[in-house]
Image (cartoon, grey):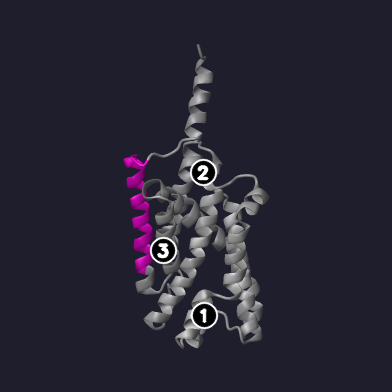
Amino acid sequence: MSSPLELASSQEAAQSRREPSPHDRKALYKLILIITILLLTLVISMYSGKDVYIFGYIVVVIYALHGPVRHHRSWQELGLKHGFMKDLRRVWYYVGIDAFLFQILPPTLGIAFMFGYYPELLKHITGRLSVNFGSLEGISAIGGLLAAALVLTLIEEVVFRVTIQEKLSWFIGTPAAILFTSVIFGLVHAVGTSGSLPIILMDVAGVALDGVFFGIIYAKTKNLALTWTTHYIADIIGLIALVLIF
């Protein structure tokens, strides 16, 4: 017969390995509430032009930390795990396509070029980054932008891939969760921007495409460090490409 200590230990281990059920209504209602808050702050941000969605990010991060901190579940729930190089070898082609190829030759810029929107879309993207790439001050500001991106990309991966995508996949499946999350990820990058509807949609589509690849990488590896690294490298390569263009 198991002792009370052994029983408690086994229960804790089972809880740390808890796999959510698609029929877990409590988990579903919590997730719907969190997504609703994020979407509301995003709508307010798009209407006001201010970064109100950051509040939504904070709510999602607190929600993500709830399991490991309060319920003592495994930190792997947040994508914190060993085996970076092993996981990279499994998905290196996805990393290469998105972090390098798509940043040097963005598909949306190619489409914009075909339809005569290339100059306007390029101007829109650089305006979103708030950096004057054609000036010495703008070049020096890139260092600060990269430092800020190191933190922001981590937060975005925790919010979109580790939390929203992963938990939503319990209920609607991984492909639909990746698509839904990537669209929201793309819309966030439209906050505070201006331009014609085709330009904004192409910019959002480009960011959402990046989000799809980040989502695939996370779905296949459950490795936060890998998706974060891919996201950050993509930002670096994208900035270098913009500097070379200007």
Tell me which numbered mark, 2 or 3, is placed earlier along the sequence: 2
Give the CA distance from mark 3 to mark 1: 23 Å
Give the CA distance from mark 2 to mark 3: 22 Å
State the residue position of label 1: 110
Q: Position of residue 182 (x, y in %)?
A: 44, 62
User: What's the mark number on residue 185?
Assistant: none
Q: What is the three-letter code of the residue carrying label 3?
A: Ile
Q: Is residue 82 visible?
A: yes
Range covered by the magenta-colored residues: 22-44
How dense is the environment of label 3, judged by Cα within 10 Å: few (below 14), some, or many (20 and up)?
some
Q: Dot 1: what SS? A: helix
* Left or right: residue 215 compared with residue 29: right
Q: Give me the residue at 44% from left, 71% from top.
A: 205
| Quarter location, residue 131 | bottom right
Q: Dot 3: what SS? A: helix
Q: Is residue 194 visible?
A: no
Q: Give me the residue at 38% from left, 59% from top.
A: 38
| Quarter location, residue 47 | bottom left
Q: What is the three-letter code of the residue carrying label 1?
A: Gly
- Please, is residue 222 above or below residue 136 in the view? above
User: Contact, CB < 8 Å: mark 2 with mark 1?
Assistant: no
Tell me which numbered mark, 3 or 1, is placed earlier along the sequence: 1
Q: Give me the residue at 62% from left, 84% from top.
A: 245
Q: What is the three-letter code of the residue carrying label 2?
A: Glu
| Quarter location, residue 194 | bottom left
Q: Is residue 109 magenta?
A: no
State the residue position of label 2: 77
User: What's the mark number on residue 184?
Assistant: 3
* Left or right: residue 15 compared with residue 31: right
